[in-house]
Amino acid sequence: MLLSTIKEVAKRAGVSVGTVSKFINNIEVKPKTRMAIEAAIKELNYEPNIYARGLKMNRTNTIALILPTVWHPFFSELAYNIEKNLRALNYKMILCNSEGDYKIELDYITMAKQNQVDGIIAITYSDIEAFISSNLPMVSVDRFFNEEITYVSSDNLMGGYLAAQKLIESGCQSICFIGEGSKKDNSTRNRKKGFINYCEEHRIDYQVCEMIGDHDKFDETLKQFLMDNLIQQKKIDGIFTVTDAYAYFIIEKLKEYHLSVPEDVQIIGFDGAKSSKKSVIEISTIRQPIELIAKHTVESIDALINKQTIEKEIILPVEFHQGSTTKH
Amino acid sequence: MLLSTIKEVAKRAGVSVGTVSKFINNIEVKPKTRMAIEAAIKELNYEPNIYARGLKMNRTNTIALILPTVWHPFFSELAYNIEKNLRALNYKMILCNSEGDYKIELDYITMAKQNQVDGIIAITYSDIEAFISSNLPMVSVDRFFNEEITYVSSDNLMGGYLAAQKLIESGCQSICFIGEGSKKDNSTRNRKKGFINYCEEHRIDYQVCEMIGDHDKFDETLKQFLMDNLIQQKKIDGIFTVTDAYAYFIIEKLKEYHLSVPEDVQIIGFDGAKSSKKSVIEISTIRQPIELIAKHTVESIDALINKQTIEKEIILPVEFHQGSTTKH
DNA sequence: TTGTACGCGTTATCAA
DNA sequence: TTGATAACGCGTACAA
């Protein structure tokens, strides 16, 4: 079961390599020669060597997907859908878990530049612009870099707005936003902004518990915030968290103090990812259209690779998912 | 920021391509020439073309990971860890979601044969042996094919045994195994077998609710089983499910009939995967040593690629995780 | 220590 | 319609 080359196939079929190449690439050949080539390929168990082809064509049909970690419901659902869409266009996908580490991200980008891949899909909050050359097609998901770099994102602004609206409509009197952001991460900033927009438009009092950057202290800050506003005094009865993960975390914390959700406090998260195809979303949340994100991301990277012109900014609609953490 | 070739670097540095190649591959050159080459590389923004190298060397430092879907807690945790281990050995990983579809699996294997990858790591229950040539290194995870194909697996037999033991130790009087298997899938069969072994060794009555192959009817079978043994009469007070996913499913079902876990029925699942690094395992379960599996799998595939001799069968220990679905 | 020249497997050009 | 041959970028004998 050894592999053979196009040369051997040509010799066996009694034709030239050029003709075999044409056949492989679906260019018309005489029925008779076609049959001879087909037979030779089968007999010799021939498979085209993609690397020789890549060398010649400067195309490998491979895309790198760089994300923090696939070990996370949102990213695994996204990675699954992106791979599915890529495969439909005959691309392979190299999975790159950067763990949000700038150095690892650069390693992957270096790899990409070595012609390993035709393009990059990245979810990153590091400043990697400088390392992206214009001849390396890239699509950013969730993160805006600059006017040049195509990006695909959920409508985070609308998501935050919707969350505030739903909390109020479900009967909350006093609501807050809880999250941990980074300066770079405009998507989480927009979630907060949308939330605030709604509150200010409707003259509703709101609070924000946030910590930029310094992750270590957030636990403490959060605990203090919950103490002050929920446990010692029930000032707040509605919470919007920047991600579902935070929502789950807070639900656990509240349990410890015997506050019940949604009776005492209602909570809305953000993401709406499921940990597997069959599982269900338990909490109330703003759901990102993951399938759509994947679809548009792949369409964009494919268009970039094929030098077609495309929208540089794609914002996709979110929707509210009613779960068990808000009242009907 | 255009890419340049080794030729251009050589010209710029005033040396030959051979010398540059040596430098790239860490073969000693004179300090003076080294500096000239280093400068030229920087100036020309040179990156070695991995495909030209791969063509020449017949190595690409890329591994294909074939699994049903990364959109699943167990597989995403596994994929994450495998990629991490591969990266440490300087391999890239192509992620292949086969959705358990034989045809898609073969497509990926064809790709692998075209020299896209140096080896395959596969989690599959299809009969793909025939398509694996001996010159394509492969490690199977969880599935035994034959004596030739290296495989890495949890100790499923011990897991089933442990589950039965723990249920009994937690006070169960009458226990059962619930699962859906396939004829090919020896890992789930072993879970059942271990469970039965314990019961028979200790002369404990047990039941089995199982369906091989025909997925459509399983829902109905299961419902009937629960009706007969739990809802109408409380015959059973301990359940071992073949995976965590089934455990969750059954917990939901029991809720509908107002049976509470673990008070009325205790449940132990199998897998113990977390949906993200930070999340916690809620249910009682037999935990697979995912990190260890990843580590040994990667070591094995690397050894195979480098033609080293290795263990053909690696069985790794499982452990019981105490969660909220069994009594202490 | 460095340079030359060939080959890896494929596609593209052009002539037949 | 087919065949011959020159690239593609790199590694490596072998020669200098």
Image (tube, coloured by chain):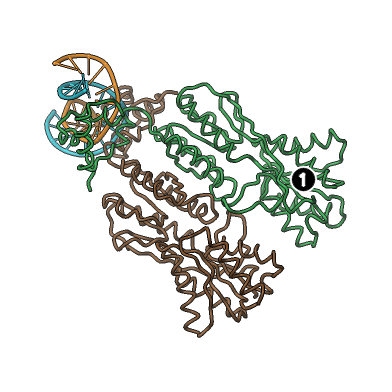
Chain colours: A brown, B green, C cyan, D orange
The answer to whether residue A274 is seen in the rendering is yes
The answer to whether residue A32 is seen in the rendering is no
Image quarter of the C terminus of chain A: bottom right
> Could you tell me which chain the residue with mark 1 belongs to?
B
Q: Residue at x 58, y 35 (%)?
A: B141
Image quarter of the N terminus of chain A: top left
Q: Position of residue A318 (x, y in %)?
A: 49, 68
Q: Residue at x 53, y 76 (%)?
A: A207
Q: Is residue A108 left or right of residue B228?
A: left
Relative to A217, residue A83 above or below: above
Q: Is residue B241 left or right of residue A102?
A: right
**What amino acid type should be assigned to the residue bearing mark 1?**
Cys
Report which residue position mark 1 lands on: B209
Quarter-of-image position of residue A275: bottom right
Quarter-of-image position of residue B43: top left
Q: Is residue A122 left or right of residue B210?
A: left
Q: Position of residue A90 (x, y in %)?
A: 40, 45
Q: Position of residue B17 (x, y in %)?
A: 20, 29
Relative to B278, residue B198 above or below: above
